[in-house]
Image (cartoon, helix red, strand yellow):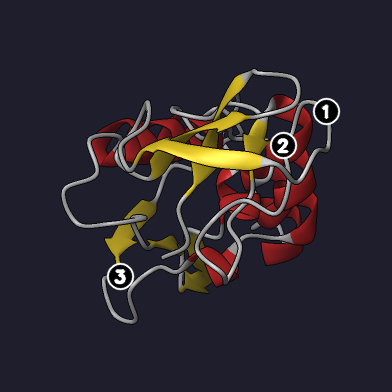
Amino acid sequence: MSQVTTQPSTTRIWEWLDAVPDPEIPVISLVDLGIIRDVAWEGETLVVSVTPTYSGCPATAVIALDIETALRDRGITDLKLKTRISPAWTTDWLSEKGRAMLEAYGIAPPQAAGGPEKCPNCGSTHVTKVSQFGSTPCKAHWRCQDCLEPFDYFKCI
């Protein structure tokens, strides 16, 4: 791809980043997940600040590579990724669009009460926790008592 001759707006860069999926939950973008904290030009260098969902997240390196690839494919050559660990990421940073996408995908979005509001498959409120540990460290395993389907619940952090 050709090198960018003028700096794209940060609005345009946010749009590009909104197309980069989370590697563990590909239905949600890194922007909707809330881990892209800032995009800014510092002179000729594009600086993207990222907050991992938790320290030690195994997807952190893949996320950085995916961001870098998406931007370099669009001609950004002078790029700096900054890991911002404070303030710590919280599920409050998930966008409403992201929450809806998680639910449509079959993952119950986080709730302040500490458990899913309803089954993402059938909508029943009769759900029980199977295990505090799900398919990834940020999810717990639940089951609907009505449709009997198991599902992941994105833990409230």
From mark 3 to mark 2, how far is it between C-alphas?
34 Å
From mark 2 to mark 1, how far is it between C-alphas?
6 Å
Q: How many marks?
A: 3
Q: Is residue 4 visible?
A: no
Q: Which mark is residue 84?
A: 3
Whole-percent x, y for residue 101 in the image: 75, 38
The quadrant in which residue 50 appears is bottom left
Whole-percent x, y for residue 156 in the image: 47, 62
The quadrant in which residue 85 appears is bottom left
- The residue that appears at 83% across and 37% down in the rendered structure is 123
The kind of secondary structure element at disc 2 is: loop
**Foreground disc of the pair 3, 1:** 1
Question: In the picture shown, does residue 52 fall above or below 100?
Answer: below
Q: Which residue is mark 2?
A: 119
Image check: 104 left or right of 3? Answer: right
Q: Which residue is mark 1?
A: 122
Within 10 Å of the Cα at label 3, are there few (<14), some (14-19), or many (20+) other Cα atoms? some
- The residue that appears at 24% across and 44% down in the rendered structure is 57
Q: Earlier in the sequence, mark 3 or mark 1?
A: 3
Question: In the picture shown, does residue 97 fall above or below 140?
Answer: below
From mark 3 to mark 1, how far is it between C-alphas?
38 Å
Q: Between residue 90 and residue 123, name the one nearer to us.
A: 123
- The residue that appears at 30% across and 35% down in the rendered structure is 59
Label 2–label 1 contact, CB within 8 A: yes
Within 10 Å of the Cα at label 2, are there few (<14), some (14-19), or many (20+) other Cα atoms? many
Q: Which mark is residue 68?
A: none
* Circle 3: residue type: Arg
